[in-house]
Amino acid sequence: MPAEYSRLNGWKDPWRRSRIGLLTLAFLSSLCFASFLLSQRFVTTLPASPYTIGRSIQSLPSNELTEVVNISQDIEDVLSLQKEKIVDDILKSYHFPGGPGLRNQSRPLSDLVPVLGGQPLRSVIIATWRSGSTFLGDILNSVPGNFYHYEPLLDHGIVQVRGPPRSKESLRYIRNLLNCNYTDMDKYLSYGQDHTWLFTHNIRLWEKCTEYPHLCWLPIFLNRFCSLFPFQSMKLVRLRLKLAEELLTDEKLGVKVVLVVRDPRGTMQSRRHRDWCPGNPDCDDPTLLCADLVADYSAALSFIKKYPKKFKIVRYEDFSLDPYKGTEDLFKFLGVNFGPEVKKFLDTHTKANSGGVSSTFRNSKNAPFHWRSDLSFSEVQNIQRKCSSAMDLWGYSKAVNASHQRFFDPIKKKFSLKP
C-alpha cells in the first residue's frame, strides 16, 4: 500500500492503522473470512472450484480449508492493489472541481469513497434497447475510478418494467448495486456466471475476474471491491423513467438520472439486427416503444421541474453529432471531470466504424441515421403512423416519401422540453 493512501486528503487506509505485520494481517483476515462462512453455515459456490452448499467450515478437509484461507488472502491482495491503482489513476489524469489532482481539490477523495464512509458520485442512464445508452455508458466508464453497473436487469429478460410487480424487484437490484451490496443478489449473480457480459463491461472489475476467477462472483469480495470506487455509474434499458423518481427522492443515494432518447425509426432499425428481439413485443412492436416514449416525456416534464439539478435529457442524435460538446455538457451536469482518458475514448470511438452491431466504435455523425437507407419507406411509414405523437413530442420530423427519406434532416434543431 503506497504512502499516498495515508496522506492524500484524508484517504487513510483503514487496514493499516495498526502496526500489524503482514503475516499476522493475513492470518487474521483468513480467520475472519472463515468465521464469516461458518456463520452463514455454508460455503459459497465458486465458478472455478464449486463447494457443496450446507457444509460447515469444521467439516472441510484440510485442502479445502487451505483454499478458503487462500481466497481470503487473495481478496486482501486484490483490494490493496486496486486502492493503489485508483489513487495512481486519479493523480495522473483526474481533476476535481477544486483544482488539479488531489492536492488542491476542495473536496477530499475520502468523501467519495464508500468504504471510508463517503458518498460516491452516482449516475444512472435510463434508455431502451438500441438507443445509444451503451455508448454513453462506456464514455462514463472511461473516467478513472469509475465502477460500472452494466444492465443489472439483464436476468429479467426482454421486457420493459413499467410498474408492479416487477418494479419492486428491479428497484431493489438497483439500490443494492448502487450501495455496493451484493449480499442478497443470488439470482443476479447466478445469472451472471452464465452470461458474463453482465460484468465484462465493467473493465476494472473484469480485469480482476480474469486474474482471479474464483473471486469474481463472491458477494464478500464484490461488496468490498465496489466500495473502493469514488464514481458509480449504471445504465438501464428495461426500467421506464417514472419509476426512477424513487431513486431521485433518496437523498442518501444522491443519484443523478440521465434519460437518453432516440428517434424510434433508428431504434427499430437497429433492433432488427439483434436475434433476441423478434418475437418479444416489448422489443419488436413500435407501438409499445412509442407508448413508452410518450410516458417518458410525461415523467420528464415532471422531473425537469422537480429535480432540475438531478435530472437531464439527452437526445442521442444531438449527442452523436457533437460527442465532445455533448460529453462536456453531460459531465458538467454530473460533476465529473472531462479528463485525458475521456478524450482518448472519444478520439478512438467516434471517428470510424469497427466491430459488430454492439460495438461502440462508430462514426458518430452517421450512426444515428442509418435507418434512412436501411428501412424501406413503407417500413418508415408504419413506424411514423404508430409513433406520430412520440415523434412530435421529442422533436423528430417525418419523412414524406422515399426520396425525401434518404436525404432529409429528421431532427428539429430547436427541440426543447416544454409543458
Image (cartoon, rainbow, N blue to C red):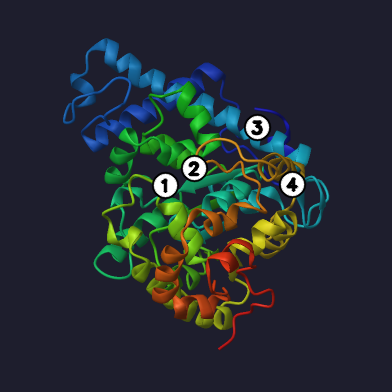
Foreground pick, 142 / 412: 412
Left-right relation of 87 to 54 = right
What residue occupies the far bottom of the structure in this picture? 419
Q: Residue 335 location in percent, x, y?
A: 69, 60
Q: Which mark is residue 357?
A: 2
Q: Which residue is mark 4?
A: 9
Say which residue appears at 45% left-offset and 22% top-offset: 73
Task: Please report whichever mark, 3 or 1, sits nearer to the chain's N-terminal start.
Answer: 3
Q: Amino acid at mark 1?
A: His
Q: Residue 388 location in percent, x, y?
A: 45, 78
Helix, strand or loop at disc 4? loop
Left-right relation of 369 to 36 = right
- In the picture, residue 169 is in which quadrant? bottom left
Q: Which mark is residue 141?
A: none
Q: Amino acid at mark 4?
A: Asn
Helix, strand or loop at disc 3? helix
Q: Are marks 1 and 2 in contact (CB under 8 Å)?
A: yes
